[in-house]
Image (cartoon, rainbow, N blue to C red):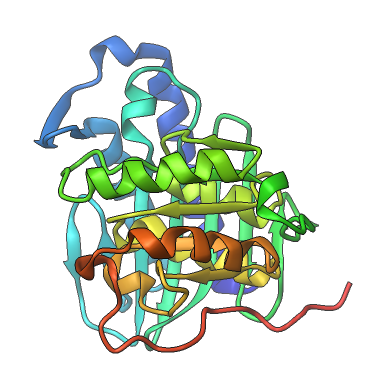
Amino acid sequence: MHPMLNTAVKAARRAGNIIIRATRNLDVVAVREKAANDFVSEVDREAERAVISTLHEAYPGHAILAEETGASGSSEYTWIIDPLDGTTNFLHGFPQFCVSIALEHRGIVTQAVVYDPVRNDLFTASRGRGAFLNDARIRVSKRQHLKAALVGTGFPFKEHAHLDTYLAMLRDMMKACTGVRRAGSAVLDLAFVAAGRLDAFWEIGLSRWDIAAGALLITEAGGLVGDLQGNESFMETGHIVAGSPKVFPEVLRLLEPHLTPPLRTPRARPTARQASPQPG
C-alpha cells in the first residue's frame, strides 16, 4: 500500500471509531443546521479534527480542504476530506454513512479512502494501481444495459433550483432501469458503483469532498465518471454521472433531454475519465 494511502486509512479508521462510539448516544449529540436541511454535528467536527491531525502528523506541509473547516495551507498536495458523509442518516441512526479522504497532487486525485464504519468496509484506491475493498480487488459491474441496471442517486435537498429538472430525470430513470436507490451518502454510493453493487449513479450539486475519493475508486475499478454530459468538469460543477462502461452512456442519453443551460458544461472537455485497464 502506498505510504500516503496507508496514512489516509489510519486517519479514516480514527474518524470511524469516533463516529461509531457516538451512535450509542445519539440523543446527546449536539447538532447545528448550517443551511436548510444541511446539518453538522459535534461528531462531524471531532471526526474531522482526528483526520486532519493524523494527516498532519505524517505530512505537516500538506494543504487541507475539509467540509467543516474549509481550505487551509498551500502545497502541491491537498487532502480533500468529508469526515462524515451522510450526517442526516447518522443523526437518525440510519446505518448509511462513511468517512471520505482523497489526496490531490497538482490537481489530480491520486489516493482515495472511503470507510464505512458500520460494516467495517474499507474502500481504497491509488491511481494506476486498481481499487480494493478490504484488500480484495473490485471491478465495476458487467451489466450491459440500463434496463437491467440498479441506479443510485441523490436528491437536491439543500436548494431546489433544479428540483423540477431532477424529478423529470428521476421519472424517466424509473421507467428505464430495474430500480433507483437513494440511500443518502453520495460518497458511499460512488464506492458501491466501484464495487459493482450499483451499476450507475447520478446527482446534481455535490461538493468536491463528496466526489473526489469515489471518482478515483470508480475509474480504478474500470468505470467511467463525468459530468451530466460525460465531460471532465464534475469536480468543478458538482454534477456527476458514474457507471460501468456499458451503462454510463445510456444514462447520459437519458439525462440529455432534461439538461437546462445551467446544467450544461461551458467549454466542455470531450471525454469522461477512465483508468487504464488493470491486470487481473
Task: Work out whether residue 192 or residue 91 is closer to the camera in this orientation and state it.
Answer: 192
Q: Residue at x 29, y 89 (%)?
A: 267
Q: Residue at x 63, y 74 (%)?
A: 2
Q: Split into 4 quadrants, where in the image is the C terminus?
A: bottom right
Task: Work out whether residue 155 or residue 44 is closer to the camera in this orientation and state it.
Answer: 155
Q: Split into 4 quadrants, where in the image is the N terminus?
A: bottom right
Q: Is residue 112 above or below residue 181?
A: below
Q: Is residue 178 above or below residue 92?
A: below
Q: Residue at x 43, y 59 (%)?
A: 255
Quarter of the view holding residue 144: bottom right
* Image spot of residue 158 (x, y percent): 19, 41
Q: Is residue 15 left or right of residue 260?
A: right
* Image spot of residue 81 (x, y percent): 35, 58
For the question of whether residue 4 can be seen, the reply is yes
Q: Is residue 276 above or below residue 46?
A: below
For the question of whether residue 54 can be seen, the reply is no
Q: Residue at x 40, y 48 (%)?
A: 169
Quarter of the view holding residue 103: bottom left
Q: Is residue 42 above or below residue 74?
A: above
* Image spot of residue 100 (x, y percent): 45, 53
